[in-house]
């Protein structure tokens, strides 16, 4: 069995779930999943897990991400992107200057409060928000705190601006586009979105479906290499069996919720230290 992650360059016009099904057919296995949903209209990095790697998808959730986004000014939609219905339009408006845009962007760097778009996969009373929105149900989206590490203006066009974003988990770029427009007193929507990076998964090293078909298992990245953002704990070889069987090991180390466990250069899985005891959370069989 082949185990590992694929750094997929997802094309636009395909859901993340469709991308998973495509990889399932290539590798003839049902055990395939993805880390970090990418909207159908967006393209770029989508980490795909194969077989045992699916157990470790959750540990990619906290990875920082990078995007390149084109924001269209003068038009707003109910979904925050061009797939939605137009709800506002500004005629004969003046585009912001470079200085005005940079000043607006500075207000969104750091920890900010954000309202996710109603057309999203967030659960509202057990239902996905986009299902409720499509049925025209009235509901409020809960605001959340997200972190923006970098916002950089890349290009300014006659009615749009391209920016690059480094951000933490849970950030919605569609919401960011809308909020930037509001800061500039203009309706705005997301025109194009490319995900450049998810943790160590980078667009420069991503693969198309054709390349994945060509290289097969050779394109799989080892599970442990995709968890480099986690702190590492070196386990005594004599305690490998105990760790793999879920038994505690007494250690002289501070509490840590998630650790990458290595022993003799071999990746064993993910563990946790609590009150001086190391226990396994997920293991590689």
Image (cartoon, rainbow, N blue to C red):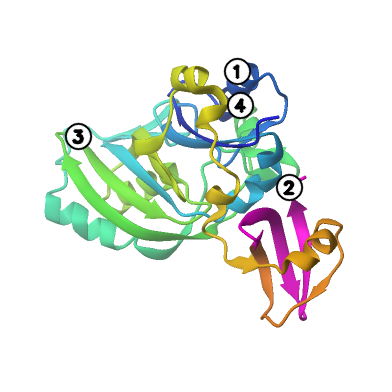
Rendering coords of residue 28 (x, y %): 68, 18
> Does the magenta-highlighted stretch encompass residue 137?
no
Q: CA distance from mark 1 to mark 4?
A: 10 Å
Tell me the quadrant of the picture where the C terminus can be found: top right
Give the mark nearer the N terminus: 2 vs 1. Answer: 1
In the picture shown, does residue 219 fall above or below 176?
A: above
Mark 2, other Cα within 10 Å: few <14 / some 14–19 / many ≥20: some
Separation of residues labelled 3 and 1 (CA atoms): 41 Å
Residue indicated by mark 3: 159
Front residue of 273 and 86: 273
Q: Secondary structure at mark 1?
A: helix
Q: Which comes sooner in the sequence, label 4 or label 2?
A: 4
Q: Quadrant of residue 265?
A: bottom right
Q: Which residue is mark 2?
A: 284
Q: Is residue 23 left or right of residue 280?
A: left
The residue depicted at 65 percent of the width and 54 percent of the height is 267
Q: Which of the two discs, 4 and 2, sits closer to the camera?
A: 2
User: Do labels 3 and 2 touch, CB within 8 Å?
Assistant: no
The residue stretch that appears in magenta = 261-285
Q: Is residue 249 left or right of residue 163?
A: right
Instruction: Give the label on residue 40, or none.
Output: none
* Badge count: 4
Choose the circle earlier in sequence order: 4 or 3: 4
| Residue 124 sits in quarter | top right
The residue that disc 1 covers is 26
* Crowd class of label 4 (few under 14; some 14 to 19; many from 20; radius 10 Å): many
Q: Is residue 95 left or right of residue 50?
A: left
Labels 3 and 2: the sequence-earlier one: 3
Label placed on residue 20: 4
Q: Mark 3, mark 2: which one is toward the viewer?
A: 2
Q: Position of residue 157 (x, y in %)?
A: 15, 35
């Amino acid at each position: 069995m082949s185990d590992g992650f694929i750094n997929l360059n997802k094309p636009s016009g395909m859901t993340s779930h469709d991308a998973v099904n495509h990889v399932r057919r290539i590798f003839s296995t049902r055990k395939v999943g993805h880390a970090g949903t990418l909207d159908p209209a967006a393209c770029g990095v989508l980490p795909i897990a194969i077989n045992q790697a699916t157990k470790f998808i959750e540990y990619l959730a906290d990875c920082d991400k990078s995007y390149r986004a084109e924001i269209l000014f003068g038009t707003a939609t109910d979904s925050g992107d061009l797939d939605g219905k137009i709800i506002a339009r500004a005629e004969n408006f003046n585009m912001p200057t470079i200085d005005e845009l940079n000043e607006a962007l500075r207000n969104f760097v750091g920890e900010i409060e954000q309202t996710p778009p109603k057309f999203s996969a967030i659960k509202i009373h057990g239902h996905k928000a986009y299902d409720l929105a499509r049925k025209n149900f009235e509901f409020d989206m809960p605001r959340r705190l997200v972190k923006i590490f970098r916002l950089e203006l890349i290009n300014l066009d006659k009615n749009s601006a391209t920016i690059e974003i480094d951000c933490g988990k849970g950030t919605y770029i569609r919401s960011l586009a809308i909020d930037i427009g509001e800061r500039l007193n203009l309706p705005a929507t997301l025109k194009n979105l490319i995900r450049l990076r998810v943790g160590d998964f980078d667009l420069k090293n991503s693969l198309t479906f054709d390349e994945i078909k060509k290289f097969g298992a050779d394109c799989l990245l080892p599970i442990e290499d995709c968890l480099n953002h986690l702190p590492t704990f070196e386990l005594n070889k004599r305690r490998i069996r105990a760790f793999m069987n879920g038994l505690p090991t007494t250690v002289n180390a501070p509490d840590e919720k998630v650790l990458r466990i290595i022993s003799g250069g071999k990746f064993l899985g993910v563990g946790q230290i609590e009150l001086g005891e190391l226990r396994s959370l997920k293991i590689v069989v």
